[in-house]
Amino acid sequence: MVVLIILFLTERVELWHIYAMMFIRSAAQAFQSPAAAASTAMLVPGSFLTRAAGLNQTLQGIMLVAAAPLGALALAFMPIGYALAIDVVTALLGIVPLLIFKIPQQLVPKHQRIGVWKEFRQGFDVVWSSAGLRWLYAIMAIVTLLVMPSFTLVPLLVKEHFGGGVNEVALMEGMAGVGMILGGAIAAALVPKRKIRWVLTGFAAACLMLGAVGLVPAHLLWLAVGLWASSSVFYILGNAPMTALLQSKIPNQLQGRVLSLLNTVAALAAPIGLALATPIGDIIGIQSLFVLMGGLGAIAALAGFFSVALRRLDD
């Protein structure tokens, strides 16, 4: 981000510079996100993990809702180079406390370190050795493959079917953030005990709400917005217990690897799903595509109830 700031302020920035910096940023975030999630289990009691996951999802929803208007406000008062500097300041706010306060963790002696590839294999072996986790990861991959394209294609649905524009798309995206806030608050308040039931039911309901968006008549945009927000609520009600489940089941020193593997599965499934959805949408239409994605996603999530091994993860 500092490099981008310099390029913008010196007016030397090119489009490929932005792509390159975003690639590096995303690669770094692939390390930071699972490390932060694994650190949660070292900071809060096991009984509080579900609430912590719900509160974290609520914070993400707040950021999703607030980011766009705050960014527009910053650009209205300062050049983009200075506006980007806000990101550096907020990063320091997150980093400095970690230099002062120590998080207790199990350190591996140097002579026992096995290298990045073998550590990745360890995380893979943890998942593969558990039939329940294999089922969970497979369902997550299928659901991601089926529904992730909807987040990219929703502007096209708003434009072609509902006849909307930028404001309507912004409303849909903003209400998705509100749904995340509400879902995280509900998960934190209820603290689900049977987590797998919540995971499968939450993801299935989220997919059904998403599919229902494609059935809404063109003059009822408000109903589509409500269904889209409801889908976010149910997604968080499934995702927060799943995070807490992995944090409680996986040994702490392996959590970062297991969570990284889950991110990898989702990252691989998302572009494959988009590549498949685009030509299908051209054939059956954008509305039918949403119905198809939501319906198949719900079936995939509910299929998890047939796995005894997956249900036993709650024991």
Image (spheres, grey):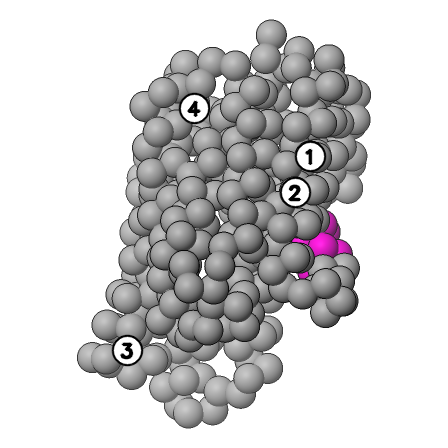
Which of pointers 1 and 4 indicates the residue nearer the eye? 1
Residue at point 43%, 72% (across, down): 164
Marks 4 and 2 close (CB-CB < 8 Å): no
Asked if the magenta segment contains residue 245, the reply would be no
Say which element carries label 4: helix
Q: For the view shown, which residue lies furthest in the top direction? A: 315
Tell me where the magenta segment starts and ends, as one range. 267-274
Q: Which mark, residue 75?
A: 3
The secondary structure type at the circle numbered 3 is helix
Q: At x 45% / y 77%, what residue is drawn?
A: 4
Choose the circle earlier in sequence order: 1 or 4. 4
Of the 4 image quadrants, the one containing the C terminus is: top right
Structural distance between the alpha carbons of marks 4 and 3: 37 Å
Q: Which of marks 1 and 3 is in front?
A: 1
Residue under label 4: 50
Cα distance between the residues tagged 1 and 3: 44 Å
Looking at the image, residue 249 sits to the left or right of residue 2; the answer is right
